[in-house]
Image (cartoon, rainbow, N blue to C red):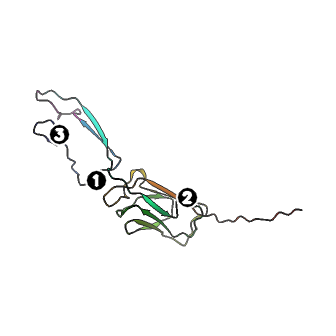
């Protein structure tokens, strides 16, 4: 902490200033809590306890998801699907945070704008009729972020594997 020359302004510097603050996190301050070290005026009178808070935000527009393959809401996806890809509006850092019911996969980046999820075990097809969902940066995670550190806002998409049955049309028998 450092006070101004006129003793009217107090500057507080974080000890871990090199570590980014978490977007959406609320920071609370209490000045003059109970204890031996408290603020006082020049006459020695203790100042009243004062509490304030602020929420960490970003000033830049966040990146967005431009497209997914398969497309969001698609309902006739092949059970033999090998990859899922997600393309962003601008180059991204290499990290990622995905919550999903999709089977195990390996992620790889292309041109820093598209992440591809390759299924680990292609011997077993996807389950027919199942809807697979993907949530990026769920619950305040910030792993998906552009090169300047602006995180993607939580984004969810899904697709459904086509059922393994066919409807057959049987001609009516008038008898």
Identify the image quadrant of residue 37.
top left
Front residue of 52 and 92: 92
Residue 141 point in image, percent of width and height: 38, 53
Which residue occupies 22% across, 48% down? 14
Chain-order first, disc 3 or disc 1: 3
| Left or right position of 155 against 128 | left
Residue 95 point in image, percent of width and height: 36, 62
Query: Label 3 belongs to which residue?
Result: 10
CB contact under 8 Å: marks 1 and 2: no
Q: Residues within 10 Å of mark 2 (few under 14, many from 20)?
A: few
- Element under disc 2: loop
Q: CA distance from mark 2 to mark 3?
A: 53 Å
Chain-order first, disc 2 or disc 3: 3
Residue 79 point in image, percent of width and height: 58, 68
- Furthest residue toward bottom: 123
Query: Label 1 belongs to which residue?
Result: 20
Which residue occupies 48% across, 70% down? 120
CB contact under 8 Å: marks 2 and 3: no
Which residue occupies 41% across, 57% down? 64
Please identify, in this view, whether the residue under mark 1 or under mark 2 is nearer the observer: 2
Secondary structure mainly formed by the magenta segment: loop
Q: CA distance from mark 3 to mark 1?
A: 22 Å
Residue 80 point in image, percent of width and height: 56, 70
Q: CA distance from mark 1 to mark 2?
A: 35 Å
Chain-order first, disc 1 or disc 2: 1
- The range drawn in magenta is 31-43
Checking the image for residue 4, the label placed there is none
Checking the image for residue 73, the label placed there is 2
Please identify, in this view, whether the residue under mark 2 or under mark 3 is nearer the observer: 2
Q: Residues within 10 Å of mark 3 (few under 14, many from 20)?
A: few
85 is higher (above) or lower (below) than 57: below
Q: Is residue 15 magenta?
A: no
């Amino acid at each position: 902490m450092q006070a101004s020359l006129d003793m009217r302004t107090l500057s507080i510097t974080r000890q871990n200033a090199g570590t980014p603050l978490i977007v959406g996190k609320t920071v609370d301050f209490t000045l003059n809590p109970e204890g031996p070290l408290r603020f006082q005026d020049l006459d020695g009178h203790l100042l009243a306890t004062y509490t304030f808070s602020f929420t960490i935000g970003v000033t830049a527009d966040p990146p967005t998801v431009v497209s997914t393959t398969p497309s969001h809401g698609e309902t006739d996806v092949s059970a033999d699907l090998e990859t899922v890809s997600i393309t962003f509006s601008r180059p991204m850092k290499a990290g990622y945070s995905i919550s999903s019911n999709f089977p195990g996969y390996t992620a790889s980046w292309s041109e820093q704008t598209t992440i591809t999820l390759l299924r680990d075990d292609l011997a077993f097809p996807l389950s027919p009729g199942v809807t697979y969902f993907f949530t990026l940066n769920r619950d305040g995670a910030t792993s998906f972020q552009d090169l300047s550190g602006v995180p993607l806002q939580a984004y969810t998409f899904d697709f459904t594997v086509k059922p393994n049955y066919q409807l057959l049309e049987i001609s009516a028998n008038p008898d």
